[in-house]
Image (cartoon, rainbow, N blue to C red):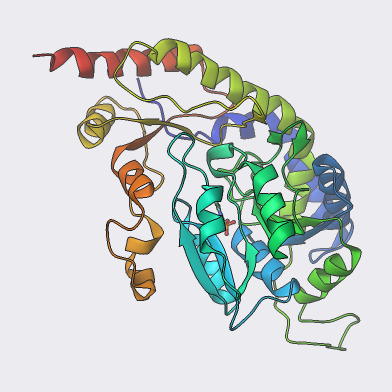
Amino acid sequence: MNVPLVDLKVQYQQLEPRISARLAAVMQSGQFILGPEVREFETAFASYCGCEHCVGVASGTDALTLALKACGIGPGDEVITVANTFVATVLAISFAGAKPVLVDAEPRRLTMDIERVRAAVTGKTKAVIPVHLFGQPVDMDPLLALAGERNLQIIEDACQAHGARYKGKRVGGFGHAACFSFYPGKNLGAYGDGGAVTTDDRELAEKLRMLRNYGSPKKYHHSFLGFNSRLDSMQAAILNVKLPFLDAWNSQRREAAHRYRTLLENFDVVLPAEDESCEDVYHLFVVRSERRDALLNHLERNGIGAGVHYPVPIHLLDAYRDLGLPAGTFPVTEKSARTMISLPLYPELTETHQKYIARTIGDFFSKDKP
Ligand SMILES: *Cc1c(COP(=O)(O)O)cnc(C)c1O
């Protein structure tokens, strides 16, 4: 049996007639840049997230970069985020001209450790980017309290957490702005790159609309240096087809995660920790094993597309060598980089697939019992 880490084809087959019709309509209309599909998606996604505004941009990385810039963050400022994230979170801080300040993750859920954030705040800190990694919301209450005390802006990286809830409220509405990616494999994915920023701040939304469109409030009038970073209309059309299914897909992900918990409970792997204040959306199902590399090999040999998110922590990447943070700086992040393994997870993953995966993992551990 072959089980890929993510399978985007099954879902496309289900949606094919709707997607084809909608894309054809965009092409017939000739409205390729911004226009009604983008507006419709922005309105629908803002409402889905429980926010006033949504601004569609070209990618999650751009969402983060533009959000930082729109919040007035730039050279001389420090922005705190977590070492256990995808590199784009940190690239955005660098692209905005600010200094990334990294903190370690907490050991239970591997998301941002708020006590470490508190310790990292300096007079130059302007913002914090909590990352709702793997679809697990960060513990927002203590972070928001800290932000209030120290006058920090909060910009959520919700690129892996569309629809996740913290204390009953969806991510995307906790800070000054929140950033989403619609990269194809994300919980809500386009058929190419795409991203969005959500916010309740009308002025910030206006600024973002200009920033994504050459800094222009009106054609050929340019108030400041902007970008060409709009959500593509064809991608918006696809997202308009897919958004109504997001909650059902997230439930399917949760059901699959629940099945994994039952199937794997007797094996020597650490299952992802749940938190009663959170409704996770399982962008990834990440287990931990001291024998990760051997297990990964064993799964690959048996046709199972497991992955590692992420094998090299940010501070140990060549691109971030100039942060001057040697190995040993963030023990939780570094240990998880050696032990994490992401098992296949997508809404259409079947119980048969999962039983095969569990059996394969069981074989691995029983074979080398002494
Ligand atoms: C995917 C992702 C991004 C970047 O999004 P792109 O659309 O690929 O630019 C940023 N942060 C996190 C946590 C992500 O998973």
Up-down relation of residue 182 to residue 163 (above or below) = below
Q: Quadrant of residue 160?
A: top right
- The residue at the point 84 percent across, 88 percent down is 223
Image location of residue 171, percent across then percent down: 72, 43
Q: Is residue 18 visible?
A: no
Q: In which quarter of the image is ligand 1?
A: bottom right
In the picture, measured across the screen, residue 233 lies left or right of residue 13, that is right
Up-down relation of residue 337 to residue 349 (above or below) = below
Q: Can residue 293 be seen in this view?
A: yes
Image location of residue 131, percent across then percent down: 58, 50
Q: Quadrant of residue 363?
A: top left
Tell which of 352 and 105 is nearer to you. 105
Image location of residue 172, percent across then percent down: 74, 48
- The residue at the point 70 percent across, 78 percent down is 227
Image location of residue 262, percent across then percent down: 46, 10
**Numbered-mark total:** 0
Tell which of 57 and 65 is nearer to you. 65
- The residue at the point 43 percent across, 17 percent down is 354
Question: Which image quadrant: the N terminus?
Answer: top left
In the picture, measured across the screen, residue 153 lies left or right of residue 84, that is right
Tell which of 351 and 63 is nearer to you. 63
- The residue at the point 8 percent across, 14 percent down is 370
